[in-house]
Amino acid sequence: MKNKYEDIFIKNLEAYFDETYNDFTKKKIATLLEQYKNTIEPVVVFKEKRSRKNIEPKKVEPVEEVNYKDYKAVPNNEKLTKEVEDFCDVHQISPDSFLTKMGDETVGTITELRKKFCQMMMERYIIGNKMLADLFTVHHTTITYYLYGKPYRPKKDAKLYNY
């Protein structure tokens, strides 16, 4: 008696050898498959039964006290605005001119101060470029420039290039 897996096997043989078998050949192949199945010894798998008694508890080592003052904190908006105000007081500029888009005459100084501020925030807090970009209302790649870019150098011959 053939089953569907034997039919699939015979169809695959026909496709592989690019032939079509008649009924006699198909019955012969099915008989050979049956004989082959009978020669295969059954495999018995024994699974070890584990009980909770066999499992040893892990040894817990004592943990030293952690000094959380050594770790950086994640700033919220109030902390950032306080940092901006303190930074602007030290450098004697207004927070509005520091945070908003700059005019042509102060590009170099404001850019350098923003670079200092971003680097200082990275040292003090766990902060990402996105949070600083939202603070300054700039693109996050500008913050990357503030952190890792070259220092600002004004062009010597700026008047020669009239575009």
Image (spheres, helix red, strand yellow):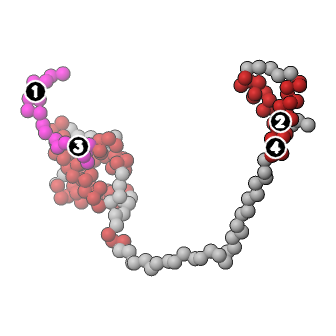
What amino acid is labelled 1 in the image?
Lys
Marks 4,1: beta carbons within 8 A: no
Kindly report which numbered mark, 1 or 3, lies closer to the viewer in this rendering.
3
Position above or below: 141 against 68: above
Residue pointed to by mark 4: 37
Q: Position of residue 11 (x, y in %)?
A: 78, 27
Task: Tell me which corner region of the image, top left, top right, bottom left or bottom right, holds residue 2.
Answer: top right
Marks 2,1: beta carbons within 8 A: no
- Residue at the image point whose x is 33% and y is 71% from the top: 69
What amino acid is labelled 4 in the image?
Lys
Residue pointed to by mark 1: 159
Task: Give the distance between the C-alpha atoms of the residues marked 4 and 1, in whole angstroms.
Answer: 93 Å
Residue pointed to by mark 3: 149
Q: Earlier in the sequence, mark 3 or mark 2?
A: 2
Give the extent of the magenta segment.
145-163
Position above or below: 58 against 131: below
Q: Which mark is residue 32?
A: 2
Q: Earlier in the sequence, mark 2 or mark 1?
A: 2
**Along the line of sight, which residue is nearer the eye, 83 or 123?**
123
